[in-house]
Image: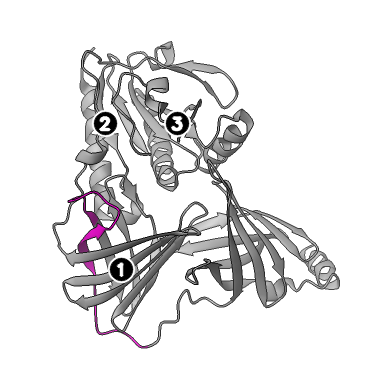
Amino acid sequence: MRAFILAILLMTGFNVVAQQGWWSAKLHRADGNVIAFTFEWKTLQGKPVWYIKNAAEKIKVDNIKEVGDSLFIQMPVFESQFRIKKTNKELSGVWIKGGSLKTQVIPFSAAKGNQRFLAGVTSGKNISGNWAVSFAKSKPNQLSVGIFKQLGNQLTGTFLNPTGDYRYLEGIVKNDSLILSGFDGGHSFLFTAKIADAKTITGGTFFSGATSKEDWFAVKDANATVPGDSVAMFVKPGEESLDFSFKDLEGKQVAINSDRFKNKVVVIQLMGSWCPNCMDETAFLSAYYNANKQRGVEVIALAYEYSTDWDRSVKSLKKFQQRFNVQYPILNTEVTVSDSLRTEKTLPQLTAIKFFPSSIIIDKKGKIRKLDTGFNGPATGAYFVAYKKEFYDTIDMLLKENL
C-alpha cells in the first residue's frame, strides 16, 4: 500500500522522498530580520508530518493538507497556520496568526538543511549560566532572568519574566555575538546581542512577531531572581471564596459551588488558547490531575479568549483539550482577554488579573489559599523544578487539612 501511494505521488510530480528530512525555515520580517527555526519532515501512514524543533522540544504538526503544489498547515494548538507553495527543493508562502484585533501575516520560506543559523568557527566565549536581564520596556527595577546553556558554539536557553518565560530558544554564539530564536505557532522570537566580556551582554535586540522590537542588556548573576510584586494578584478585603458559573466546551453550565468540587482542593487555572505559557501549564496540570484526581484534587480552567464568538473560542480551546488529554473542565468565560473589566466580570472577589497564566488554589472549605501569577515552564530548568515542588507541597498540605 505504501509503495502504491508513493507511486501515485511521484506520478503527480511530487517527490515524497525528496521532501523528507530536515528543513531550515525562515520568517521574514519587513525590517529585514529573520526568525529562523528547523523542522523535520516525515511521512506517517502515507501522510506528511512536521516536527518543529526548538532546543529540547519537538512539536508534532500533523494537520497538513496538500492541494496540487500547495500545503495548508494548521498548527496543533493556536490559531496559526502556514499557506505554502512547494517544490522538491524549497517552500515559500506565509505564516498567518489570528489575534484579538487583527491577523498577523509574515512571509515564510524554507530549504533543505538542518542549520538554524550558519555557525562558522567555534567562539572562545561561553555564556552558560544565569544572567540578570533588563528589557527596555520593563518597569524600573523589573528584571528578567536569562538562562543559557552553551556547548561549543551551540546555545539554548530562555528568558524568565515575572509573567512566565519565553519557552524553548535555540541558536549560536559566533565570535562576540549571540543569536537565539524560537517558534511554536504562538511565539515567533529572535534575540540578538553582543558579548562584551564574561559578565556583560550589551546591545541586545528582541524581535517578536511581524513588527515588535525591544532593546535589552544583561549582567552575569548566578543568583538572579524575578520580582513578582508588579504582577501580583490579591483577594479583596472582606472576600475569602469565589462564586462563578460558566459553560464548558459542550455548553454545560459548571459552577464552582457544585457538588463535584465540594470538600476538594481545587486549582483554578486562568488561561487562554492564544497563550504559549498556558500550553506548558496545561500540559503540567493535565498530567498532574490525571495522576492525582483520586486524592481529592480538582482543576478548573477559566478561558479568556480573543473574541466573544463562542464557536471560534471553543474550536481553539478544544485543540488544547485534545492535545494535552485534559480531563478537567475547561470553561469559556465569554469575556475577552483584552476586556479591561475581565476581572470584574468573572472573578470580582480578586484584584486585577494582570497576566496569563495565573492560578488560584482553594482549600477543602472553599477558601482561597494561594494566588500565583505566571508559570515557570520546563524550558527554565531549575526554576521549573522549584515551581513544581512548591505546587506539590501546597496541594499536599491542603489535602492533609481537616474539614
Q: Distance between the residues labelled 1 and 2?
A: 31 Å
Which element is circle 2 on?
A: loop
Q: Is residue 144 above or below residue 262?
A: below
Which residues fall within the magenta stretch? 121-144
The disc, 3 or 2, on the residue closer to the chain's N-terminal end is 2
Res 345 visible: yes
Depth check, front residue: 105 or 380: 105
Which dot, 1 or 2, sits closer to the camera? 1
Q: In this view, does 108 lie above or below 75?
A: below
Task: Assess whether residue 122 is covered by the magenta stretch.
Answer: yes
What amino acid is found at the position of numbered circle 2 in the picture? Answer: Met
Most common SS among magenta residues: loop
Q: Is residue 143 above or below residue 274?
A: below
Q: In the rendered picture of this protein, how many numbered marks are placed on residues?
A: 3
- In the rendered view, does 395 fall on the left or right side of 6? left
Mark 1 — residue?
Answer: 204
The disc, 1 or 2, on the residue closer to the chain's N-terminal end is 1
Mark 2 — residue?
Answer: 233
Marks 3 and 2: CB-CB under 8 Å? no
Which dot, 3 or 2, sits closer to the camera? 3
Q: Position of residue 65 (x, y in %)?
A: 72, 55
Residue at (37, 25) in percent of width and height: 343
What amino acid is found at the position of numbered circle 1 in the picture? Answer: Gly
Mark 3 — residue?
Answer: 339
Q: Where is residue 85 in the image (x, y as percent from the top left)?
A: 71, 67
Which element is circle 1 on?
A: strand
